[in-house]
Image: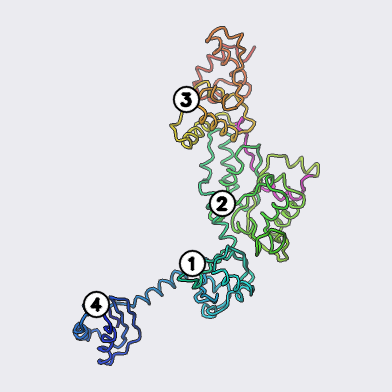
Amino acid sequence: MRIEVTFTDRVGIAHEILAVLALRRLNVVGVEVDPPLIHIDAPGLDPAALPALSDALRGIAGVRSVAAIDMLPGTRRRLHLDALLAALPDPVLAVDRAARVVVASAAAAQVAGLPEARLAGLDLGELFGEPGLTDELTAGGFRMSGREVTLNGQPFLLEVTPIVDVEAAGAVITLFTPSRLGERLDAIQNFDEGGFDRILGESPPVRALKARAARVAAMEAPLLILGETGTGKELIAHACHRASPRRDKPFLALNCAAVPENLAESELFGYAPGSFTGAQRGGKPGLLELAHGGTVFLDEIGEMSAYLQAKLLRFLNDGSFRRVGGEREQKVDVRVISATHRSLEAMVADHSFREDLFYRLNVLTLDVPPLRERGQDILLLARHFIARAAAQARRPPGRLTPAAAAALLANRWPGNVRQLENVIFRAVTMSDGGTLDAADLELAGAGMQAAEVPTEDAGSWEDAVDGFERTLLRRLYPRFPSSRKLAARLNTSHTMIANKLRKYGIPER
């Protein structure tokens, strides 16, 4: 039985309390003193004898109360600590000031292939096969930046948290696998990314794209996304990942056009210790290791060098690769989604892209339509970008005037959605009023040419408006050759468009 005694602290009172139990020949196996409490574990104490023992203890000067408890606080803390360590997914080691293991979590024991009791007392440098690690830790007071180590053949990032009293009393060592680091990186980079709901648009091309993307997302084969610059290929890739069975694993991206060849190789495949000058001590995992179980998105795959194409092809064939400067083969489970605005078939024909790699990447394909082919989405996107830009500028969102809306619809948008977003952002930040007019879009550098009406032909305001409408309708009618299609594109009534077409003689007879 275990009891808790509340007392007023004074010299010798704990000795007097234990003496009362000794007089009753009660064996005490555990005592914890934390004034004003003393906790005692006496297995031979019968609950029926507790009232008499309580009376005897309260006879001691300073003892205020005696109560039965289920376990000692120290035991409870140890149970909670054991449960906490067992629940941690990452291996954790507590070491003393000499860098010897004191406590190891169940995950650490599993990775090391040793029972937790066998790990206790091991030198940390000996455990990781790096004798100099112990001296490095103790000499620096256990203050060390993260570095890669190997435990039982597996790479981990070692993170040190010093335990400081007056001086370094040891440390807590946490080991992170590359995939766990990838999950953290994914959470930081993609915290606001969504699924197909983030792809705005109600036009038939966008609806068809979403339907096809939802089907290919659930498949495990490589996916190639084709589309002009600025159409949102990475957004599509991210949505496919979020709709796939790998949604809970990392999604990591590499822009092949933005990184030099030597850096792109180390970013994608990682590098071994000492592989080149300036490399991190202990090496560094690449995106393939970090994204284990998830997805790697290779943007602008058409810009990848011939050397990297060959190395990527080998990985796609069997899932294995070597780090830069490394000798050990590694296998990871990663789905590759790639994207390009270039014609890979033409690049294969002129031998600037490997034909075998093209067929490995081009298993599943999505074609992202340019903005000019999804005209009825332009105003929807523009209003969304206006609201977002206004929120960033901390001002009320404005509205588009009819002239501005017509100018947006008439522009061909060679830079696609990205260009539209930039134009709207500049227009919102540079305008002063509560509305956005065509002049604001011109000021923003949009190059709007919705209605090129020579000033010498505009004898009055009505003439200028007629010229604007005539030019706009003539430009749009070939792509929307009916009054209903044109009305849907301009988000207005069919009757009004039919009347305007008759007024300006469109189409010409």
Quadrant of the snapshot with the N terminus? bottom left
Badge 3 element? strand
Task: Check disc 4 and report the residue beneath it.
Answer: 8
Of labels 2 and 3, earlier in sequence is 2
At label 1, which amino acid type do we have? Leu
Question: Is 100 situated above or below 263?
Answer: below
Task: Check disc 1 and report the residue beneath it.
Answer: 88
**Of 188 and 479, the residue lying toward us:** 188
At label 4, which amino acid type do we have? Thr
Count of marks placed on residues: 4
Q: Nearer the viewer, mark 4 or mark 1?
A: 4
Residue plotted at (62% across, 38% down) = 368
Residue plotted at (32% across, 87% down) = 28
Badge 1 element? loop
The stretch of residues the image draws in magenta is 352-373
**Of 270 and 196, the residue lying toward us:** 270
Of labels 4 and 3, earlier in sequence is 4
Please tell me whether residue 372 belongs to the stretch shown in magenta. yes
Badge 2 element? loop
Task: Check disc 3 and report the residue beneath it.
Answer: 435
Q: Nearer the viewer, mark 1 or mark 2?
A: 1
Of labels 4 and 1, earlier in sequence is 4
Task: Check disc 2 and report the residue beneath it.
Answer: 244
Mark 3 to mark 1 CA distance (whole Å) = 55 Å
At label 3, which amino acid type do we have? Thr
In this view, the residue farthest toward the top is 459
Query: Where is residue 125 shown, x and y percent of the image?
Result: 61, 74
Mark 1 to mark 2 CA distance (whole Å) = 27 Å
